[in-house]
Image (spheres, grey):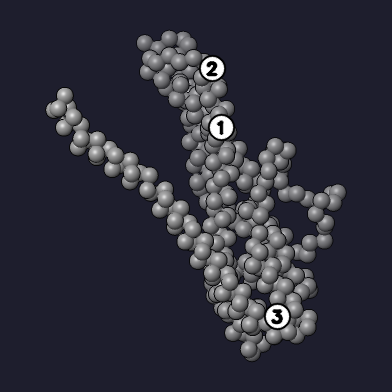
Amino acid sequence: MITSWQLPVAVVGGAAAGAGVFLIVRELLPAVPSLGPTLARLRPRLDVPGAPGTATGLGRWGFLTRWLTVPAKDLAILGRGVDAYLASVVTSALIGLFLPAVLVALLFLAGVRLPVALPAGSGIVVAVLFGAIAHRDVSRRAAAARREFSRAFCTYLDLVVLELTAAGPVQAMERAARVCHGWVFDRVDDALTRAQLQMVFPWDQLRALGDEIGVVELRDFAAIMQSAGDAGAQVQTTLREQGDSLRDRLRTDALGRAEAVSAKLEMPAALLVIVLAIFMIYPLIARLG
């Protein structure tokens, strides 16, 4: 029989569980694409970063930047806004905050009595842990996106070298970006399109893109193409050397990550061997005893 104090606890626990499920489903559903940010990227940037009156675009989550460090470059290469990042961190923290309370309420209904301070203290710890996991996921995905960008950029360098034999540096960059498909080539093509619309040099726009997403190779490529555009230098050999150096770095990075994964797999294998040895030796020791 349910007493008068058990009903409010069940209602609060059910409401917290429902709110957590709602937030999880809301994050998993695909977001509706917005036309505003796309049009904003095509407009010339006349404002100065950090100047008074500059729009930050943080929306209702802007106050969180006082305590959280926003990974702007990671969000830029992933194509995510700062507002969406802060919303995901807050959502993860809220789920972690209410999860211990829901578990304690369910255990309480099952007859297991726990201290009231347990869900409060553990909720704060789990909230911080879930928020850190959401932040770590952004950094991990950004690192994978930069590796993918570098691999695709090697192909773009080869295409630019081929196009330079029959066209100028600007035309070579534009044609090479339109040959292949993929988000990397789309980002480069968007930067070149913005350069045309804003009537600026394309290498300046590519350098700005490299600074925005944190890709050093794009800035180096912009400097090489600037020398070709300003002084008419022959840069085919330099671009080939940059492509070879980038491939060597990617190969070394892939080998390092493979060795790290192999090292992580050695520990479970060693534990499994130890467990099997114990199961084999224990009967002999028990029989001798």
Q: Residue at x 68, y 70 (%)?
A: 220
Report which residue position mark 2 lands on. 117
Query: Where in the figure is residue 41, as x and y percent of width and height?
Result: 71, 62
Label 2 Cα crowd, 10 Å radius (few <14 / some 14-19 / many 20+) = few
Q: Amino acid at mark 2?
A: Ala
- Residue 172 relative to residue 15: left or right: right
Q: Which numbered circle lies on residue 115? A: none
- 115 in relation to 219, above or below: above
Tell which of 175 and 251 is nearer to you: 251
**Residues marked 1 and 2 touching at CB (< 8 Å):** no
Quarter-wise, where is residue 225 in the image?
bottom right
Q: Residue furthest left?
A: 287
Quarter-wise, where is residue 145 in the image?
bottom right
Mark pair 1, 3: CA separation: 50 Å
Mark pair 1, 2: CA separation: 15 Å
- Residue 95 relative to residue 219: left or right: left
Query: Where in the figure is residue 179, as x and y percent of width and height?
Result: 56, 78
Query: Where in the figure is residue 62, as x and y percent of width and height?
Result: 72, 41
Which of the two labelled residues, at mark 1 and mark 2, occupies the earlier sequence position?
Answer: 2
Mark pair 3, 2: CA separation: 66 Å
Which of the two labelled residues, at mark 1 and mark 3, occupies the earlier sequence position?
Answer: 1
Q: Quadrant of the N terminus?
A: top left
- Residue 282 relative to residue 198: left or right: left
- 65 in relation to 185, above or below: above
Report which residue position mark 1 lands on. 127
Q: Amino acid at mark 1?
A: Ala
SS at badge 2: helix
Q: Quadrant of the C terminus?
A: top left
Q: Amino acid at mark 3?
A: Val
Q: Residue at x 63, y 53 (%)?
A: 75
Q: Which numbered circle lies on residue 170? A: 3
Tell which of 13 and 175 is nearer to you: 175
